Amino acid sequence: MNRFIVVDDPAAWPLGEHGGKVISVSDYLVPAEPWPARGIRVFNLARSYGYQSRGYYVSLLAEARGHKVIPDIRSIQDLNAPGFVRFLPAELDALMQKSLGRLKSDDFVLSIYFGRNMAAQHQSLAAALFRLFPVPFLRAKFSRGQKKWNLRGVRAIPMDEIPAAHMDFAKDAARQYFGRSRYQPARGRHYRYDLAILVNPDEESPPSDKAALGHFVQAARRQGFSVELIGRDDYPRIAEFDALFIRETTAVNHHTWRFSRRAQTEGLAVIDDPDSILRCGNKVYLAETLRAARIPMPRTEVIQRGGRRDALARLGLPCVLKAPDSSFSQGVARAATEAEFLDLTDRMLGASELVIAQEFVPTEFDWRVGVLEGAPLFVCRYFMARGHWQIYNWSSRRRRDISGDFDTWSVEDAPPAVVETAVRAARLMGDGLYGVDVKEVDGRPLVVEVNDNPSVDAGVEDKVLGRQLYERIVASLARRIEARREGRLR
């Protein structure tokens, strides 16, 4: 992929051709010859990104031309939007208090150069702001209120506003940024698409193990993808890719949802898409959707604080309580007595106004039906953890007893009613990749969960299909890319 650094005055650019070919804003806006529609990456370092400024039009026209641009037009719009800084994630606020808490002054200015700051104590805050506002040179202003520090504004700055004392650091930050392997010219075979796979190497129970990730990478390369495993700090780079595949446990109030939402906004093919994360990530939404569609499920009550005893009288004991955003059996508890029920709901209602309660349906195993694009993909049975009522027992001191055994079935050999019910439930969530958990009681399927980020581990979910499982998921991403391109051309 050809890389261009777009600046107002190429003669004043201090890094030469390091990082890409340096051209003027004028030459990019009005080229001597038409730009090719693909294979161009643009770093927009124009002096101003103000609305309808020359820098604004560089990013706007880059999008129209199908070029990958940093910063993209949405980041510029965010910076230009009055009051945008009031709508920032809670985790940034906590980071801000930690980073600035010991300062003696009531005002502070943070300079951010390609996501870096000169002071180590502020580096995490600088990186977090760069993830939200992926603009090469930023200046953030903070002020101390009566109780905490507040972000007053963030703006892009041109290179000539960088203080002389900061210039060497800013140049080094630029060199490191452009020197990333991701930005090096492609070598060897030509790839049609760029795929980012979002992972968290520190996650204890990720949705895919290392072996499965390797299979995904190989399958993607066979289908013409250039593949990179990315992490949380790569948020500013989403616009560089054609597709995003999330293999980190998702949640709504979490960076995985923001990655997904940003990717969707940028026109990438996305699994898991933000709507799926939103729908599957809240058990209240899931329960209401399944009920409205008459999908069989265990008897379920949506509980609020004032109606707990009435719900308990209808449901009976023992029962299962679920926090709305629970996943992988975490945030799920069983109440055997009224006292346990009241204690558990007290705690859960402290974090959410609504909680899910379901009848306890003991089974030896849960069916898991993988569904992709509304069609069954794989079928497994997950057996309960040793001496436990769930497939995961996170309180076990022995690692081997945390999860139960499994077996994998071909779709054709699995009970038809289980597969058909799971597919119906998944289609209510969207057309992505889902894992539907189903209990079978006297031959009758009951949907327990629809997960947007199902486990795909080597030797488990792929035991029947083998590498074909990975090929099908990657092929879905390729189809989505082509569908989006055709839609844009029309």
Image (cartoon, rainbow, N blue to C red):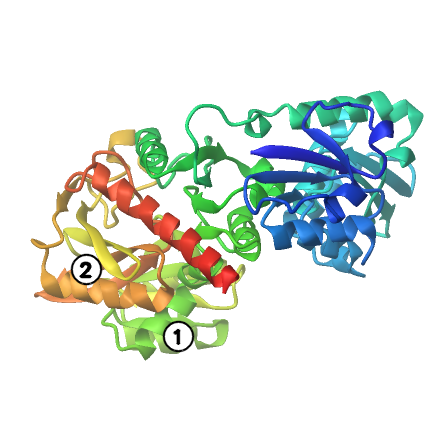
Residue with the mark numbered 2: 439
Q: Is residue 321 visible?
A: yes
- Residue at horizontal 38 percent and vertical 59 percent from the top: 322
Task: Tell whether 281 sits left or right of 253.
Answer: left
Query: Secondary structure under badge 1?
Result: helix
Q: Which mark is drawn over residue 309?
A: 1
The quarter of the picture where residue 117 lies is top right
Q: Amino acid at mark 1?
A: Arg
Where the N terminus falls, by quadrant? top right
The answer to whether mark 1 and mark 2 are in CB contact below 8 A is no
Q: Is residue 277 visible?
A: no
How far across and how far down the image is residue 457, in percent? Answer: 28, 37
How far across and how far down the image is residue 398, in percent? Answer: 28, 30
The quarter of the picture where residue 333 lies is bottom left
* Residue 306 vertical position relative to residue 134 in the rendered view, above or below: below
- Residue at horizontal 72 percent and vertical 24 percent from the top: 17
Q: Which mark is drawn over residue 357?
A: none
Going from the N terminus, do you reach mark 1 or mark 2 first? 1
Query: Secondary structure under badge 2?
Result: strand
